[in-house]
Every structure is written in structure tokens, then in C-alpha cells.
Amino acid sequence: MVDNIATNPERVRRTQDDFSISDLAREFDVTTRSIRFYEDRGLLAPERRGQTRIYHQKDRVRLKLILRGKRLGFTLAETKTLFDMYDRDGSSVNQLQIMLKLIEDKKAALRQQLDDIKVVLHELNAVEAGCRTELEAKLT
Amino acid sequence: MVDNIATNPERVRRTQDDFSISDLAREFDVTTRSIRFYEDRGLLAPERRGQTRIYHQKDRVRLKLILRGKRLGFTLAETKTLFDMYDRDGSSVNQLQIMLKLIEDKKAALRQQLDDIKVVLHELNAVEAGCRTELEAKLT
DNA sequence: GCCAACCTTTACGTTAACGTAAACTTCATC
DNA sequence: GATGAAGTTTACGTTAACGTAAAGGTTGGC
């Protein structure tokens, strides 16, 4: 406690590898609530110093991955699966294969969605045409 | 308290225009729970004979419209808006115009979704390529 | 010696469209 | 008159990803 007041007048032991929850929240523009939620769902496990959560680069990278996963349409559960694989399997070869499979699945689902949307668009066009015809009839 | 068998001899009669809740459930392959839910949300208002709901062609057509709306991606609230318009406005001209607007909005949303999905598909392809490269490196 | 800025936990609220179950009545039938 | 098939109401459960308090520590500065 004595030394880091000298080295760091702002905070307690602020090293390169030390983040508070709001540090990360600011950096990635998410709420602290979300970060704690990810922890609750088993995607993060920060160190505790007393009551307080201390995040390191490892956690920071994980958060980054969580958010990238979300952007790519992965659910938190899917991302967690990935993390669990990684944690069980240091050689990330298997993890890469799992990742590839997840990606394939997601791609297939998205392609299905594409097709569905196209179908609905066509149906909507048909209904629209019907409406317009009907409207014409009523307005004459 | 006068027995309505006396006052209403048609009580049990099953006419062309008379459906029980499970008749409709069977015909449209939905649960009775759903039908009652639609009523709860103000989309249906069947006649009551005692406790029992009696549906007529009018209700049957509405249910059909509800389900078509769902297939087209309308929420129940949106369909209800449509019904309310129709009920307030006998001349269905206005209703047709509302319908057309709803359709336009829905089409715009779907086109947006199409674009979003395409973007994500491309991102997924990029991530996949990265994975494959990495995997190659590890396997050599 | 107190205020403000952080941090914490607990826990209910939100959206959509029902599923599921409990507990009950009515009706037709064997 | 027991049974079973339908009908009813009431109301909590489900999924995802948090939002939003409430109520309370701890620390540091003035």
C-alpha cells in the first residue's frame, strides 16, 4: 500500500494489467451491469480484491471476444461453449475446429433466414398488389 | 334464471356459422390457448353462450387473418391495429391504405434485415478464413 | 467528519406469444 | 352415477440480455 501511492497517485496499484469494471465499461461502451451479467453467465471470472472485481488483460480479451461474438450473432451461451472448449483444451486446434463448426452452423442459419425473408418479401408484394387492386376498384 | 333451453331452442344447434373453440383450433392447427390469448389481446370477441365461446364466420375470418399476419411477420399488436382501423372505419379504403403502409414498413425492415445478414455473413467468412489459416499453421 | 464517487449484492421488471398446470363446471354416455 | 371429453378461469413459467432500482459498503479528498 505504501509503495503504490508513491508510484501511482491516482489509484491503488494501477498496473498495465489492472482494470476496474468501469474502465472496461468505458472502453467497450457497455454497462457495468452487462459485464456483471456476463460473469453471472460464466463468461468472465475476474479476480477479487475484497469485494471489488479486478480485471486483467485476459479478462479484457474475453470481454472483447464476447462483444465480437454478439456482433456476429452468437448468443452468450454459444460464446461460453467456445470459452469452455478453449479452457479444457490448451491446444487451441480443437477450439479452432469447434469455432469453424459454430461458424458453419451460424452461416447455415443465416442463409435460411435470408431465404425466409425473401419468401416473405414476395408474399408481401403479392398482398400489396392485391390491396392496390382493391383500392383502385373502390376509388373508381 | 329462466332456462334458456326454453327461451333459446337453438342453443345446441350446430349451424353452418357455429364453431367451437376446438373446431377452429383443429382447422387452423393452433391451440385453444392461443385462440383465447388472441381474445385476451383484443383481436377476437366471440359470442358467449353461458360460459362457452361460440365463434362465427366473422371470427373465423379474423383468426385466419391473424395467422396470415403472423406468417407475414406482423406482431399481434400490428394486426390488432389493423382490425381496430377496420372496425372504426366501415369504408375499408382507409384500412387498405393503413395496410399498405404497414406492408411498406415491414418490407423496409425486412430489406434492412437482408442487408444486415449479408454483412454478418461476410464477417463470418472473414473470421472463418482466419481460423483456417491459423489451423493450417498449427497443423504443419 | 462529511460528501461524492466508486463499488457491491439482491432482486424485480421488460418483450412476445404463448405453454402448462391447477381446479372447476357442464354435458353426454355407458 | 361414474367417467371422460370439452369447456372455463387464474396464474405462474419460459427465453435473452440486460434495465432499473434499493440499500448498502469503502475510500479519498476537503
Image (cartoon, coloured by chain):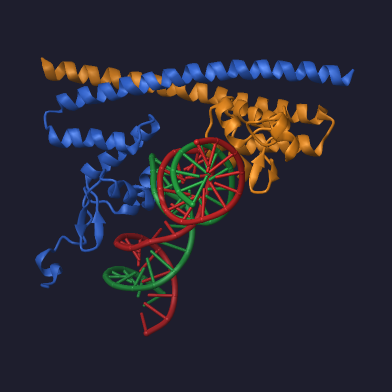
Chain colours: A orange, B blue, C green, D red
For the point 37% across and 48% down, which residue is it?
B34
Q: Quadrant of the image for the N terminus of chain A?
A: top right
| Residue A41 seen in this snapshot | no
Hey, which residue is sitting farthest right in the picture?
B140
Q: Nearer the viewer, residue B13 or B20?
A: B20
* B125 horizontally vs D13: left or right: right
Q: How many labels does the image show?
A: 0
Establish if D30 lies above or below A108: below
User: Residue C27, how many percent across, how many down?
Assistant: 28, 69
Q: Nearer the viewer, residue B37 or A63?
A: A63
- The quadrant holding residue A71 is top right
User: Residue B103, how many percent across, how many down?
Assistant: 31, 23
For the point 67% across and 48% down, which residue is it?
A50
Establish if D30 lies above or below A49: above
For the point 81% across and 20% down, which residue is it?
B135
* A135 horizontally vs A105: left or right: left
- The quadrant holding residue B134 is top right
For the point 54% across and 16% down, which residue is it?
B118
* A96 horizontally vs A139: left or right: right
- The quadrant holding residue A94 is top right
User: Residue A70, how many percent across, how many down?
Assistant: 58, 29
Q: Quadrant of the image for the C terminus of chain A?
A: top left
| Residue A132 seen in this snapshot | yes
